[in-house]
Amino acid sequence: MSELPFPLETPAVQATPVFDSVTCLFCNSPSDSLEGNLEHMQKRHGLFIPDKEHLILDLESLLEYLHLVIFEYKECLYCHTSRRTIQAVQQHMMGTGHCKFDISDEGSEFRDFYEYDEPDANIADENQESNQVQLWSRGTSTSPVQVDDTSMRLPSGRIVSNRSAPAPRHPSRKPLEPQPPRHASSLSVAPTAASQSDASESSAANEDPALPKDHPSSKALAKQERQKAALAIQLSSMRSSDQRALAHLPASEQRAVLSQALRLEAQSDRATRQFRGQMDSLGNVLMKARFVNDVPGASRAHKNRFFAA
């Protein structure tokens, strides 16, 4: 086997830079301190960290996660667009003004870094939920934990991974919601049944006592009302002479006559359309006219037209 005149080279995989809290995430410019880096990214690139007082972790840990999304996953922070290289995703964010992240969406992964106080409508429920969260979060840290090469566990327990990578094997572990006691369901069913019986009694009391026992049900009444309304609309669209001709007939026979008239009108329309189509096609079959194509050129510029034979 002959050797190739040049060695085969495999494309080198771009190494992920190590996170540095004083290096800009978008232009890689160094700063003197973390505060200086945040000020540079805010003034130069428009990075704004909303609701800092509600963060459950420090700013350095938040920047570390943003560094992971940009440099490891190569994704945009705002629209999650993927690129092949780190420089490409940085240019995308700076060119489109996406040097920011959004926490307004309920499904945003960045909302897991925030904790908002709920309104104190029920203090007992809040205390119970806080105790469960404390028991669940015992032994966990306030910074993201690297699960594997392509996924990271957030402080809330949610696992985020690269969108191009397969789903993680370990599902996101969340605290179990408290289950209501079984006897509560039976207690809640009793008032419902009682309310239904009260409603049926009230509806029975509101019924007209003058109606006979063999009166049709409410569904039959509604159907009769719809039929009467449709018949009135059809009669109103007819001429006065036709209305007088049908006035002596009962409602059932009036509906039969009107339906028969509609069928005859539809048959007449179909026959008219068929006749017109046949007449239009006969114009070309009998060679009554010939079609002249438009000839290109300024000397014979005219429209397409039919000429009689």
Image: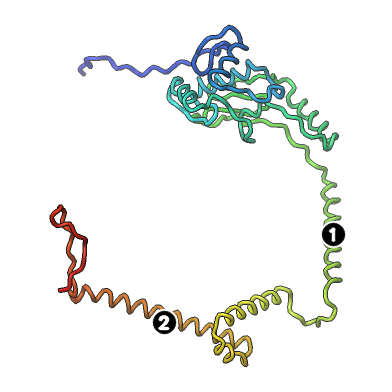
Instruction: Determine which residue is flagged by label 1.
Output: 195
Q: Percent x, y for residue 301?
A: 17, 57
Residue at image position (41%, 82%) is 268
Task: Give residue 203's position: percent from left, percent from top.
Answer: 83, 68
Quadrant position of the C terminus in the picture = bottom left
Pointer 2 residue: 268
Contact, mark 1 vs mark 2 (Cβ under 8 Å): no
**Picture quarter with the N terminus:** top left
- What colour scheme governs how the chains and residues are painted in the rendered image of this protein? rainbow
**Residue count near mark 2 (Cα–Cα under 10 Å), binned few <14, some 14–19, many ≥20:** few
Residue closer to the observer: 292 or 56? 292
Q: Amino acid at mark 2?
A: Ser
Q: Position of residue 20 (x, y in %)?
A: 56, 11
Depicted 229 relative to depicted 121: above or below: below
Q: Which residue is at the far top?
A: 32
Q: Residue furthest front?
A: 299
Q: Is residue 73 above or below residue 238?
A: above
Q: Secondary structure at mark 2?
A: helix
**Circle 1 sits in a helix, a strand or a loop, which is it?**
helix
Q: Amino acid at mark 1?
A: Ser
Seen at 83% across and 37% down, the residue is 121
Quarter-wise, where is residue 117 in the image?
Answer: top right
Nearer to us in this view, 96 or 308: 308
Say whether residue 37 is left or right of residue 216: left
Q: Nearer the viewer, mark 1 or mark 2?
A: 2
